[in-house]
Every structure is written in structure tokens, then in C-alpha cells.
């Protein structure tokens, strides 16, 4: 389970950044007063246009960034107090995840299993399950640099899931991927839900959201502008389709600001 | 966990072609290549010098004078020559410029008369000194003639030549050849270590930090339940090991050049090299070099953490390279010795201590001060790296 309470994240701007952004402000607010809860066995989607604060929020959940204010709990562990303990429960996958191209899938998966302290017995079992599920046996000993994008994405998935995390974070996981590879990811997200995992994923592709999500929040300019269940979203929408409704909410938020 | 990271990073690093070239190939080849080229070029130059026939213009109005006789009698073992006779210097410069003659020797017209009256004879030599070896060759010829003339004059006066040498000085050098080489050329060893140690650290440091940021693998690594300091130490150990390996391979290359390829013939150098390659010497050298290499890694890592791309890291570290190498050159400056002040200056202390080590004159107190100073600086640099690595804006592109 993920509980996010009033988190805020600010970054100090360098002189160069202030000049580039044409601002005198020394601090940029990336995320402001964001709260939500993700339940186990449900998929929570964090939607928002580029630069809205989705990735920053997810990086805070994964313990890569520390919130400036507020509290995040992963499986009951406060990320600010015990980030390492919280990270043990998390699997983190992004569409742009890099892999160690000079290693083989076997070496990479073993490395991450060791980092997560997975026992040898569990590792063998998990690895076999994942390799079978993702059809990875044929290229397990090839250098990752020589694999196709689809194969690499399968390696990324195995890396994310090797320690069988209770919480899985997907940050625009299908971004830049071909249809077949994207389909693998969509299937994986669905499987995670079936296994009772807590799933959060960010996207701006409404068809994926429609297909997968139970709950959603729309984030814009660092703040939550809509939160509810997918069913409520569908029922209450005034635009013709989900994408149009998403744009309408963003525009309404902009107008309210003015 | 540190060992897990170290093992993986080492494997990854050893599969990087650039690192292998900088860490193993270049260091091991550089000495055999440099010494091989120098030996080949200098021996072929000497050979050419010995065999080259010099066309020499003897410029005199009297081609039968004693100088001409003596000059003609100089054996070809001192360099073969062909003599041409000219009555004046007209056209000599042009012929030398065209290389049809290599030397012009102007002999006074009253040479025999001056010789008989025991007076000085002025000899002018016209040559182009950009043709290396020409001056040496003519000096050899003229030294023989002058020696003969001296002997003749002493004989004529019935004097012993030793009369002109009232002092017979002999120097008793108490320094061993090891000390001599250590003091004069011992600076080369630490210089080597510093250059190759630095280069050896460079690519792994950039690859393991900036490279990971660029390839977006660092973010994934930071989502694992491993404390950041452990990640830093695991990676840093690989950077340090690469630096030490590069310096070691440079030494291996030097050893191969001397002992296997026999590219240096100087027996004194060979004797010293054999005597310093003892277990005690190598251990002492590594004790000094390990904190130095950690310091290098500690200086590079904050830069590589800060840089957003491989190119940016390289462009920042190139000037740092010069700053590091300058103190290394102190080892070549005569008169600068290891003392209680220089032992407190990082890099300079290791250079001077290594030099003393080669000479076998390094005292325990100065070695300890140099080592501890370097440990303190290495620790500070590691701390700076740790702080940089902990800064969010540095680790996320």
C-alpha cells in the first residue's frame, strides 16, 4: 500500500537555470501539496502533461528523491525515515530505463537479486518463472547491448520483478516502445494487479489508463487537479471521450488559475 | 553489498574497450615503444654517422702543408672522408647549402711557418650545424691533429707533457650507483605512476558515474535498498584499482623493455632496476601509491557526478590532469628534497618519497608523514565525493 500525504518538492535553481526559465525565483516548485492512496490489488494511475510533476512524484515514492515536505509510506514504512527498508518493497520501471549493456541478462538479473538480498533458492525460482513468462531463455547469455528493444524491455521487467515486490511503480513504461513490447508491459501491469500488488503508473496515454486503471489522479503544474475512481471519471465526464475530458480538466485548471 | 557492487562494476569496466586500452594496452606498450623507437633511431643515426662519407673542402693556397698531410692521414675508422682542395672560400657556402660538401676547413697560408715558430694557427671551420653530428666529426679530426702538434712541441722543447697537468684529481664517490640513479632519474618512477595512475582512473570514473547517468542506469541502481555510500565505495574501489593497475602495467612495460627486450644497454641502470625490484621496495611503493590513487579518484568522482555527459566530464578533467601532473614534475627538479615541509604537500610528497625509495634513502619518519598526509587528503576527497553523490540534483540528469 502507498500513502502519500501533502508532499512538496522544490529544487534550487542555478543562475543559468533562472536565466533559461526567465525567472527571478530561486526555487522551483515541482510538486506541491500532493496526497493520494494506492490500495493493494488496484491500479492507480497518475496522469498529467509533460512537466506536470509525475516523474518527480514517482521518484519520491521510490526513494530516489526526498520530499521537501510531507510524508510517504510504502507498506507502512516511512520513506523519509527508512528509505532503504521502503525500497525493499518497491519495483521501479520506466520506459527509458537504461541497462548495463556490457552484461548479459543473467548477470544483470543476478546482480539486482543480490542487491535486493534475494536468496539463491528464491532467485532460481523467480528467474525461471520470469524467463518462461517473458520467453527469455534464448538470449539470457547474450550481451544486453546486442539485444533488440523488445528483448531489453523484457530484461528490464525481469530486473524490476526479480525480488517479487509488493509495490510496483511504472513511470511512462510504454513511452517510445513498439506496439508488441508495449503490450507486454500492459500485460505485466494487469498481472501485478491479479497478484494483489499495489500498482502505480504514470502515463499520458488515455487508452492504457482506460484499460487498466481502478483509480486515477491528474496532476498539473505540481498539484492534483482531479482524483477519483476510473468509474467516477467515466460517469462524470462532460467531454466526448477520455482524452478530451483529460484536456478539459487541464484547461479548466489553467483557467481557474487565471 | 559493497563487494557485490565492486564485482559487478569491475566486470563491467573490464568489458569496456576504452578502459582496457587506457588501463592495460597503453601503459604496457608505452615504454617498449618509446625506448624501442629511441634505441632504433639513435643506433641507426650513429650507424649512419659512422658510415657516412664526408666531403671536406680544405681551403688553402698550399695543399702540401703539414695540416693537409696530417688531415689526410687520419684513419677512416673515425669516419670516412673525401678531400677536395680550394684556394679560397668562394662558393663554399653554396656547396655546403647544397650538401655537395659537408665541411670547409680554412687553413692559414703560412701554416707551416707558424708551426715551425711555435705560434698559434687559426683554423676556421665552415659547416651547417643543423646537420647533426657534423661538428662532432670535425672535432674528432681536429683533436687528433692538435694532440700530434702538442706532442711535437713538447718533444722539441724536451719537456714532459705532464708539466702542463700539475693537478691529478681523482674523485671518490661514496654514493652507490643505486643512490645516483635514484637521485638523478628516480623521479621518473613516481611520475609514471602519477600519469598512468591518473589516466587509469579517468575512464572508469567517467564511465561509472557520468556514464551511468547518461545511460540512465544510475536511477535504477538508486531504487535498490543499498545505501548510497556503499554504492559510492563499490564504484570507487574499481576506479582506484584501475588507476593502480594502469601504473602497474606501465612498470611491467618498463621491466619488459629492460629485461626482456633489452632496449637499454646501460649496465648501471640495469643493475639499479634489478636491485629495486624487491618485495620490500614494491610493498613500500604501493603503500605510498594507494592513498595517492584514492585521492585521484576522490578528485575525479565529484566532477564525474556533476557532469551531465561523457564529453563534459572529459573537458573538465583535462585541465585537472595538468594540475595533478605539475607537482609530479617536481621530482625532476634538482635540489628539491623530501623534508618535513615537502612531506606535507600532497602529490609532491609522494613523488619525492618514491624518489628516495628508489635511491634507498627514504627514512621511516618522512615516509610516515608523506603517507599520513596523503591519507588525510584522500579522506577529504572521498568525503567531497560522498557529499556530491548524495546531492539529488547531481545524480539525476
Image (cartoon, coloured by chain):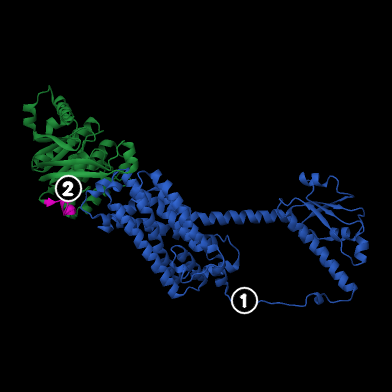
> What color was chain B assigned in the picture?
blue
The chain holding disc 1 is: B
Q: Are marks 1 and 2 on the same chain?
A: no
Residue denoted by label 1: B173
Verify whether residue A54 appears in magenta: no
Does any portion of residue A188 appear in the rendered image?
no
Q: Specify the segment rendered in magenta.
A: A77-90
Q: Specify few, some or many for label 1: CA neighbours under 10 Å numbering under 14, 14-19, or 20 or more.
A: few
Q: Specify few, some or many for label 2: CA neighbours under 10 Å numbering under 14, 14-19, or 20 or more.
A: some
Residue B358's place in the image compared with A78, above or below, is: below
> What color was chain A assigned in the picture?
green
The chain holding disc 2 is: A
Image quadrant in which the N terminus of chain A is located: top left
Side (left or right) of B136 relative to A126: right
- x and y percentages locating residue B159 in the rendered image: 86, 76
**Label 1's element?**
loop
Verify whether residue A82 appears in magenta: yes
Who is closer to the viewer here, B323 or A116?
B323
How many angstroms separate mark 1 from mark 2 (CA)?
A: 75 Å
Image quadrant in which the C terminus of chain A is located: top left
Residue denoted by label 2: A69
The residue shown at (30%, 58%) is B233
Side (left or right) of A65 relative to A245: right
Residue A48's place in the image compared with B83, above or below, is: above
- x and y percentages locating residue B230 in the rendered image: 26, 57
Amino acid at each position: 500500500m502507498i500513502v502519500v500525504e501533502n508532499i512538496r518538492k522544490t529544487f534550487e535553481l542555478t543562475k543559468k537555470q533562472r536565466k533559461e526559465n526567465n525567472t527571478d525565483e530561486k526555487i522551483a516548485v515541482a510538486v506541491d501539496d500532493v496526497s493520494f492512496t494506492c490500495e493493494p490489488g488496484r491500479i492507480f494511475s497518475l496522469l498529467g502533461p509533460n512537466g506536470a510533476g509525475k516523474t518527480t512524484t514517482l521518484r519520491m515514492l521510490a526513494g530516489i528523491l526526498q520530499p521537501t515536505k510531507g510524508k510517504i509510506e510504502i507498506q507502512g514504512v516511512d520513506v523519509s525515515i527508512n528509505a532503504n527498508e521502503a525500497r525493499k518493497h518497491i519495483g521501479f520501471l520506466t520506459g527509458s530505463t537504461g541497462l548495463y549493456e556490457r552484461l548479459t541478462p543473467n548477470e544483470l538479473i543476478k546482480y539486482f537479486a543480490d542487491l535486493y538480498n534475494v536468496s539463491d533458492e528464491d532467485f532460481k525460482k523467480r528467474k525461471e518463472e520470469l524467463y518462461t513468462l517473458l520467453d527469455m531463455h534464448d538470449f539470457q547469455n547474450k550481451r544486453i547491448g546486442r539485444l533488440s528493444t523488445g528483448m531489453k524491455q523484457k530484461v528490464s521487467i525481469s530486473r524490476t520483478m526479480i525480488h517479487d515486490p509488493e509495490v510496483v511503480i511504472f513511470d511512462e513504461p510504454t513511452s517510445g516502445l513498439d506496439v508488441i513490447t508495449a503490450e507486454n508491459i500492459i500485460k505485466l501491469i494487469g498481472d501485478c494487479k491479479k497478484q494483489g500488488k499495489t500498482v502505480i503508473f504514470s502515463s499520458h496515454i488515455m487508452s492504457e489508463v482506460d484499460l487498466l486503471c481502478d483509480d486515477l489522479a491528474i496532476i498539473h503544474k505540481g498539484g492534483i487537479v482531479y482524483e477519483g475512481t476510473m468509474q467516477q471519471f467515466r460517469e462524470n465526464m462532460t467531454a466526448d471521450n477520455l482524452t478530451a475530458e483529460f484536456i478539459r480538466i487541464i484547461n479548466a485548471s489553467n483557467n481557474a488559475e487565471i | 553489498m559493497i563487494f557485490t557492487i565492486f564485482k559487478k562494476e569491475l566486470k563491467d569496466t573490464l568489458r569496456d574497450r576504452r578502459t582496457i586500452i587506457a588501463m592495460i594496452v597503453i601503459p604496457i606498450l608505452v615504454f617498449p615503444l618509446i625506448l624501442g623507437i629511441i634505441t632504433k633511431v639513435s643506433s641507426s643515426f650513429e650507424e649512419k654517422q659512422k658510415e657516412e662519407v664526408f666531403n671536406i673542402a680544405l681551403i688553402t693556397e698550399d695543399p702540401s702543408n703539414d695540416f693537409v698531410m696530417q688531415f689526410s692521414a687520419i684513419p677512416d675508422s673515425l669516419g670516412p672522408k673525401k678531400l677536395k682542395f680550394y684556394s679560397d672560400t668562394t662558393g663554399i657556402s653554396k656547396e655546403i647549402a647544397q650538401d655537395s660538401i659537408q665541411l670547409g676547413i680554412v687553413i692559414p697560408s703560412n701554416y707551416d711557418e707558424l708551426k715551425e715558430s711555435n705560434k698559434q694557427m687559426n683554423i676556421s671551420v665552415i659547416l651547417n650545424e643543423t646537420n647533426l653530428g657534423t661538428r662532432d666529426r670535425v672535432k674528432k679530426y681536429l683533436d687528433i691533429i692538435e694532440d700530434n702538434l702538442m706532442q711535437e712541441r713538447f718533444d722539441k722543447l724536451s719537456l714532459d707533457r705532464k708539466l702542463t697537468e700539475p693537478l691529478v684529481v681523482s674523485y671518490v664517490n661514496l654514493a652507490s650507483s643505486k643512490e645516483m640513479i635514484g637521485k638523478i632519474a628516480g623521479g621518473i618512477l613516481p611520475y609514471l605512476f602519477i600519469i598512468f595512475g591518473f589516466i587509469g582512473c579517468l575512464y572508469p570514473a567517467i564511465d561509472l558515474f557520468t556514464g551511468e547517468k547518461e545511460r540512465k542506469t544510475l536511477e535504477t541502481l538508486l531504487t535498490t535498498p543499498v545505501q548510497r555510500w556503499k554504492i559510492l565505495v563499490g564504484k570507487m574501489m574499481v576506479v582506484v584499482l584501475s588507476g593502480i593497475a594502469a601504473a602497474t602495467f606501465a612498470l611491467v612495460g618498463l621491466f619488459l623493455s629492460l629485461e626482456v627486450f633489452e632496449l637499454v644497454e646501460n649496465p648501471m641502470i640495469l643493475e639499479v632496476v634489478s636491485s629495486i625490484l624487491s618485495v620490500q621496495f614494491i610493498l613500500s611503493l604501493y603503500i605510498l601509491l594507494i592513498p595517492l590513487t584514492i585521492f585521484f579518484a576522490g578528485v575525479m568522482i565529484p566532477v564525474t557526478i556533476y557532469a551531465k555527459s561523457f564529453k563534459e566530464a572529459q573537458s573538465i578533467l583535462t585541465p585537472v590532469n595538468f594540475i595533478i601532473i605539475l607537482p609530479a614534475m617536481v621530482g625532476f627538479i634538482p635540489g628539491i628534497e623530501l623534508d618535513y615541509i615537502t612531506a606535507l604537500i600532497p602529490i609532491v610528497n609522494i613523488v619525492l618519497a618514491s624518489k628516495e625509495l628508489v635511491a634507498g634513502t627514504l627514512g621511516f619518519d618522512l615516509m610516515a608523514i608523506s603517507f599520513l598526509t596523503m591519507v588525510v587528503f584522500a579522506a577529504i576527497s572521498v568525503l567531497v565525493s560522498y557529499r556530491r553523490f548524495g546531492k539529488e540534483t547531481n545524480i539525476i540528469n
